[in-house]
Amino acid sequence: MITIDAILDAYINANILLILVFGLWWCARLLLQASGLAHTYTIQLRLLNGVFLAVAISPLFVLIYKLLADYGVVSPGFNTNFSDIVVAQYLQGNFEMKPAQLEELLGLRGRFTSELLGLSSSFGIVVLGVIATGITIYTARLILSIVVLRKIIRQSHVWRRFGNLRLLLSDTTSVPFSTRTLTRRYVVIPSNMLTDEHDLRMAIGHEFQHMRQFDLEWEIVLEILKPIFFWNPVYYLWKQQVEELRELSCDQQVLARKGYDAKAYCACLLHVCQNSMNKGKLFSIPMPKVALISMDHSFFNRSSAVFLRKRVSSLLDDQKETNRRSVFVALMVPLIAFVAFSTVIIQKPDDWSQDRIMLATIVNLDRLAERNSVVASLAFNR
Amino acid sequence: MRQKKKIEFLTEVELEFMTRLWELGEGSVRDVLAKLAPERNLAYTSAATILRILEQKKFVESTRIGKTFIYRALLSKDTYQTRSLKDLSEKLFDNTPASLVARLVDDYDLSKDALGEIRALLDRRLEDDHD
């Protein structure tokens, strides 16, 4: 049976992993930029999504590792726990620190979880209260955004039907966007756009490309995860990266596939932006949808104007992305290996290792020596 | 199927189409397209879609003659003008039509003839009320 302890442990691990993996992703991106591959937006988007998937299935890596250990493929003496590795390094004299300090540091996570679960201190109560309130508020926001989105879809007019895809015309939205339910996909176009044939074609082409890239599905997953990771700044940075890369990649692919004129495409983006500004901010709350242009002004999102400028300059640069499968594989394999390794080493150890027992013994001996010296000095003073 | 909320006002493009239909009385998609400004350069399918939406919103109705749909406005121009002015008065002029008229007279740079017409209209209305 899954205990609350195990859930909290998995939650802490997921947050640590998200931070570690995002750091590594940032390094991979810098490497691509240094190699003159900064414009390979589709590869970068696939890498980021692939790594996210690896984080999502990370408990599977732990399971595989445990199976390998059970079948003796991994030696029992092989240290795979981060705290055990640190203790081993300490005992070998590779870094200096007071033993009691190190033990305190290593026990930090254990104390934190026990304080949270036992509600034994005001700190634990406050943290748990903040997490519970945050999850409730962000879940309510998510539900509200779905209700608003459903309302926009219900009030729209069906223009075309292709299988499970509905092309809708809406009077209430000023920015074309796409979204989906479990069984249906929707592309919503502002009805005023019907009067501009060129903009209409480009907007539909753009939204169809989002569907080909499975951007809707990723957006929905990220929005669903928001209530869980609401406090983690890395989650917002991650989402911002995904949003930027998917738009840049989509623009690049639409131009390459359809052969639209880059200037006309940029003009379409600017028209939509202008219409959206004239109508006022329609989407004041984030929604599980993928729009042609983003008017999001949240704290972690850079200004929409700055991003629009980046999109336009990227389109006018006309750097076509060649299919570099080798680059993707060369980066994806080490990234997934890192996720698997990090997942295994951040797990809470099942039992105390020999090194950990040794550290505890040293700490106890230190404490004993300290007490003895106090007693000896008192006796000497008498 | 769930009934859509009744839409009372036209979008900019729909108003353009309705204006042409009011002028025509009734007409096909091609008739309405022919009435639009040449620089509009609107595709036949887009125009047909706009008229179909107007029909869904119950601003127009259509009858099929052969392969062609003939559209006719269900709402008169006067009725729509009244509805729009009432909405404007409610939303922007605190439901006081006098403020709306005052703003119009002050800022619209009306000619003496136009002002005379307004005065005549008001006099006639006041006389009617008096009777």
Image (cartoon, coloured by chain):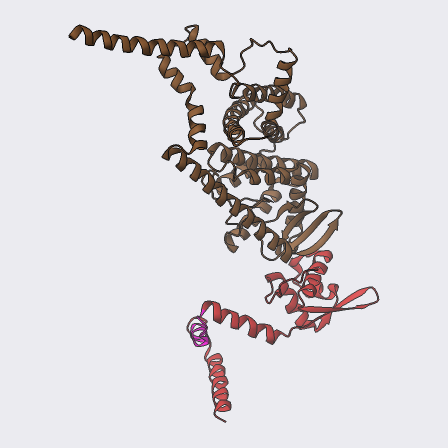
Chain colours: A brown, B red
Q: Is residue A123 above or below residue A147?
A: above
Which quadrant is home to the N terminus of chain A?
top right
Residue B15 spot, x, y in % from top left: 61, 65
Along the viewing direction, whichever of A183 and B117 lies nearer the viewer: A183
Residue B64 spot, x, y in % from top left: 80, 67
- State yes or no: residue A136 in magenta: no
Q: Is residue A196 above or below residue A77?
A: below
Q: Residue at x 54, y 50 (%)?
A: A144
Along the viewing direction, whichever of A18 and A6 lies nearer the viewer: A6
Q: Residue at x 56, y 10 (%)?
A: A78
Which quadrant is home to the C terminus of chain A?
top left
Q: Is residue A194 above or below residue A219?
A: below
Q: Residue at x 63, y 45 (%)?
A: A179
- State yes or no: residue B100 in magenta: yes
Along the viewing direction, whichever of A352 and A379 lies nearer the viewer: A379
In the displayed structure, does residue A264 sit left or right of residue A90? right
Residue A315 spot, x, y in % from top left: 59, 37
Residue A255 spot, x, y in % from top left: 65, 38
Q: Tell me the quarter of the picture where residue A211 sits.
A: top right
Identity of the residue furthest to the bottom in this view: B131
In the displayed structure, does residue B112 sit left or right of residue A36? left
Numbered marks: total:
0
Q: Which residues are magenta?
A: B93-105
Q: Tell me the quarter of the picture where residue A263 sits.
A: top right
Query: Can residue A217 be seen in the rendering of this structure?
Result: yes
Identity of the residue furthest to the left in this view: A382
Q: Main secondary structure of the magenta part?
A: helix
Query: Can residue A291 be seen in the rendering of this structure?
Result: no
Q: Tell me the quarter of the picture where residue A209 sits.
A: top right
